[in-house]
Image (cartoon, helix red, strand yellow):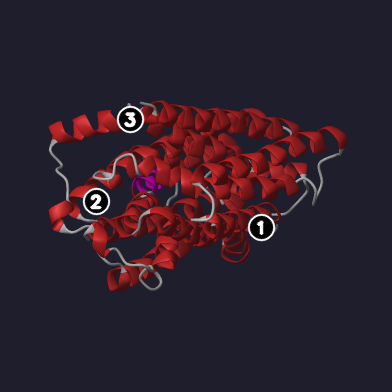
Amino acid sequence: MPENLKPAAPPKGIALLLAALSALGPFSIDAYLPSFHEIGQSLAATPLQVQQTLTAYLLPFAFMSLWHGSISDALGRRCVILWALVFFALASLGCAFVTQIEHLWILRAAQGITAGVGVVVGRAIVRDLFDGAPAQRMMSQVSMTFALAPAIAPVIGGWLHTWFGWRSVFYFLALFTALLWIVSWRYLPETLPPEKRQSLRPGYLARTYWRVLTCPPFLAASLAIAFNFAGFFLYPLSAPTFLIRHLGASEREFLWLFGPAMVGMMLGAWFSGRLAGKISPATTIRRGFLVMALAAIGNVALNLTLPPALPWSVLPIFVYTTGMALTMPSLTLLALDLFPQQRGLAASCQAFLQSGGNSLVAAIVAPLIWGSTLTLAFGMTGLLLFGSLSALLYFGFQHRRASP
């Protein structure tokens, strides 16, 4: 679509559809968390082996996030999304039939290969359609709806686990994906015309990936998003321990964690959309970091002075995700705008950095610090510190580039 023909308003329902596509990733992480204990019993697996099903999902998710965008730059957005949904539905159905933990590792990896398409290609679609403040508002609308997934996924998973057993969670994922394929086939537009598509030749890809992944401002903005998100993601990764062991909640009470997080993300995304065009993206980002800093410092203070308990142990998470969601649309667009001709590939690199960081947090950081709520609070603070430094580096690089 030519730049001067971009619509003034998004196609009807596109924000909801992009949010649903993006939600596949977090939904397939969070929905089965309440079933960890039963999965271990059913498949004769240790808690560590069950935890590794999460790592088995996240590592291929990170790797393939590097490719979804460049493939969509070459073949178009629509067909890549439709084929990914088919493979994700089949992998989800396979998970419901496994009899050994090793088989679940393999099929979770298959889910991870395709689950990131919605996030990566969805960001490229937004930039295909809009520039500037309209793009920020559109990204905020997607983020607001997307925020529902981490909140409702463990609730739905917990009730399915209680009523029908852990396998029903994967039947549900397969059915949801099939319905999403039908809606996408009917309503998802192709936003990248043939004349704007890029090559899949190895030489071109190698040069372009190198250019993107060695661009200091791009790396700094993307790492700021990744570190900010990781400061929150520690808690979903540690949810069974954090909620059940430390706070005394049951498998059906995961909403205590994901509810405040959802409300915070929706509130922050709403503020981001309202501020678009009224204040600069840099000011929006600074305000978001201030909110996150207050949350992280308050989290440490609460854990130093009060015993772990509901509801105060989850209140800092609400404040943190509000600030995180306030910064995310602006940081995302600032990074993508550095490569306007390769938005899909740039979105892939951005998602790769975030999901790769999530994989490391899942495999190494979370198991090391989920032993107490205080160490989790310190983890949030440390990751936010790295995110703040990354954002400062981005603005420093851009200032030097703008200087004569």
Is 339 placed above or below 2 here? Answer: above
Q: Find the distance from the CA under tag 1 to the CA under tag 3.
A: 35 Å
In terms of secondary structure, where does tag 3 sit?
Answer: helix
Which portion, as a residue range, is magenta?
Answer: 103-113
Q: Which residue is mark 2?
A: 72
User: In what quadrant of the picture does the N terminus appear?
Assistant: bottom left
Q: Which numbered tag is attached to residue 372?
A: none
Q: Position of residue 255 (x, y in %)?
A: 67, 58
Q: Which numbered tag is attached to residue 213?
A: 3
Dominant SS type (magenta): helix
Q: Residue at x 41, y 71 (%)?
A: 13
Q: Residue at x 64, y 54 (%)?
A: 264
Residue 109 belongs to magenta span: yes
In terms of secondary structure, where does tag 2 sit?
Answer: helix
Q: Residue at x 51, y 62 (%)?
A: 145
Of badges 1 and 3, the one in the foreground is 3
Q: Is residue 375 left or right of residue 208?
A: right
Q: Residue at x 34, y 45 (%)?
A: 113
Is 356 placed above or below 188 here? Answer: above
Q: Residues within 10 Å of mark 3 (few under 14, many from 20)?
A: some
Q: Which residue is mark 1?
A: 259
